Image (cartoon, rainbow, N blue to C red):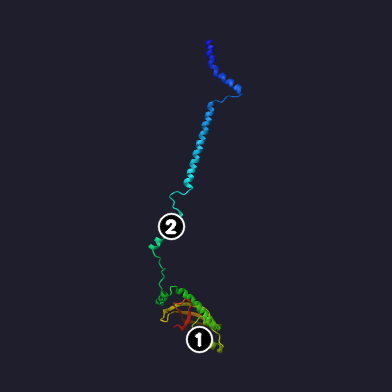
Amino acid sequence: MLMQGEQLRADLPAIVLILDERATGGPVRRPASRERRRTVNIELIILAAVAVFVISRLYSVLGQKTGAEPPAHRLREAVARASEVEDDAEPARAPVRPAFTGPAAAGLETIAATDPGFSPDDFTRGARKAYELIVAAYADGDRDALKTLVDDDVFEAYSDAIAERAKAGTEPMRLNRLRSARIAEASVGEDGFARVSVSFEAELTDGENLRMAKEIWTFKRPVKSANPNWVLDEVATAS
């Protein structure tokens, strides 16, 4: 009987478990399972909190200005001060003009000293155009056009030649080709006029005959005048 009582006590927990399962209709979950779920949930909450903290710190470092960045107005002031220092340290230099060469170099230097905008190349291009216009106006007998391109003495000489040609009934010589134009001499006179002489070589024709013309035309203008136009002052035959 004693042995049977001890065996009954040993089997008692299993009997209770079976009775519990029959009463509830299924297996009874032990309290240990609920503790494990609670532990897992706490760990997930902790990991989520850590992730939120790390992301917020990254945003605060990468997405916002740090204390090492100067304000915009201070940066502009620093750049302005640096520019002022550079200006004070190295004054602006005037552009260096190439030295003139050729037989008229000294006279060209004198003109450029008074008129810094003077350019021999620009002048030569303008002289070529003036030669074409004056020869055409003389051939057409256009005194009005001539009067704007030559001074009074040259205008009077051309006007007389136009009248004589009309009386004789001869054909005027027209420009066939301008072969060359080069500055031969330059100066500034005591009268305040700059004078530049240009040597021209051109082919002239009356429709039947072709003649080579070699002349030196001298142009003038008041060196201190705001008017940039030059007028023909003298015509001479080149030797």
What residue is at 50 percent from the left and 34 percent from the top? 43
Dot 2: element: helix
Q: Residues within 10 Å of mark 2 (few under 14, many from 20)?
A: few
Report whether 111 appears left or right of 134. Answer: left
Label 1 sits on residue: 156
Dot 1: element: helix
Label 2 sits on residue: 77
Q: Amino acid at mark 1?
A: Glu
Q: Position of residue 215 (x, y in %)?
A: 47, 82
Q: Position of residue 225 (x, y in %)?
A: 46, 77
Q: Position of residue 189 (x, y in %)?
A: 41, 81
Query: In the orientation shown, which residue stands out farthest toward the left?
Result: 89
Q: Which quadrant would the C terminus be assigned to in this image?
A: bottom left
Q: Quadrant of residue 109?
A: bottom left
* Count of numbered circles in the view: 2
- Tell me how far mark 1 sits from mark 2, CA to CA: 68 Å
What residue is at 53 percent from the left and 13 percent from the top? 5
Q: 145 or 55, which is in the foreground?
A: 55
Query: In the orientation shown, which residue stands out farthest toward the right?
Result: 25
Q: Position of residue 105 (x, y in %)?
A: 40, 76
